[in-house]
Amino acid sequence: MATVDCVARYGYRGATTTRIASRAGVSRGAQLHHFPTRAALISAGAEHLFASLTSDYRDAFESRSGRRTIRAAIETLWSVMEGKRFVAVIEFYIAGRTDAALKASLAPVVENHRAGVARIVARHFPDLASDPARFSATLSLVLSAMLGMISERYVAAPDPATERMQFDAMEAMLSRLNRGTR
């Protein structure tokens, strides 16, 4: 997790292999033995991060198993996304725009992560997933909207009233999907 911690704290460019090795408490030689390139180290960190987030989504949905409402699903997704690790997610996304190697290694990790989140949500809300294409597009829209909301927090103080209205809009959209209407 040292890679993710460094990316979150220093940004993608500032997360040097020397910094990461120091944070992990290993020698530079040991780091190079396991991860011969920065790209390999960063990719492993990203894989770990997204696997950890998928696991956290699963745990969060399991812990709220008694609350099977669309609003509970939205709040559950948000509870994981508003954690500190999403600073690293945003850094990875932005860096992938100009770093072709990162983009190539990150694309399948993100795709696998989103598919995992979709399986978790579908398991708890099977009616939402009855139209797989619409479900996938709608869930992707909700996750992207939340990612934007998180990104906004890095430059402006969160406004709870606005966030509630945003959740209301997501809930309305998902409710329409659940009823099979457009």
Image (cartoon, rainbow, N blue to C red):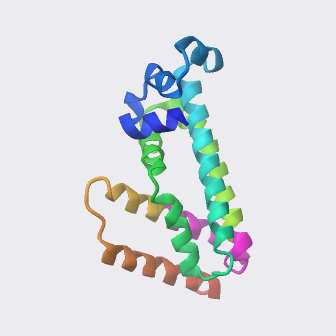
- What is the span of residues highlighted in magenta in the rendered image? 122-143
Please report the residue visible at 49 percent of the width from the left and 59 percent of the height from the top: 81
Instruction: Give the percent coordinates (x, y) of residue 142.
Output: 51, 68
Q: Nearer the viewer, residue 118 or 32?
A: 32
Q: Is 150 situated left or right of 81 in this image?
A: left
Membership of 120 in magenta stretch: no
Please tell me whether residue 128 is drawn above or below residue 22 in the rendered image: below
Where's the C terminus, which quadrant? Answer: bottom right
**Residue 135 makes an appearance in the image:** yes
Q: Can you say whether 117 is above or below 75 in the image? A: above
Residue 79 point in image, percent of width and height: 51, 65
Residue extending furthest toward the top: 29
Residue 152, by quadrant, is: bottom left
Q: Is the stretch drawn in magenta largely helix, strand or loop?
A: helix
46 horizontally vs 91: left or right: right
The answer to which of 132 and 29 lies nearer the viewer is 29
Task: Indicate left or right for 138 with 128 as reference.
Answer: left
Q: Give me the residue at 58% from left, 32% from top.
A: 43
Residue 116 % position (x, y) = 68, 57
Q: Which residue is drawn at 45% across and 59% down?
A: 82
Q: Which of 108 and 1 is in front in this view?
A: 1
- Residue depicted at 46% across the width and 31% down the height: 99
Res 68 quadrant in image = bottom right
Extreme residue toward the left, this view: 156
140 is within the stretch colored magenta: yes
Quadrant of the frame with the N terminus:
top right
Residue 2 position within the rendered picture, expressed as x and y whole percent measured from the top left? 52, 33
Q: Can residue 133 be seen in this view?
A: no
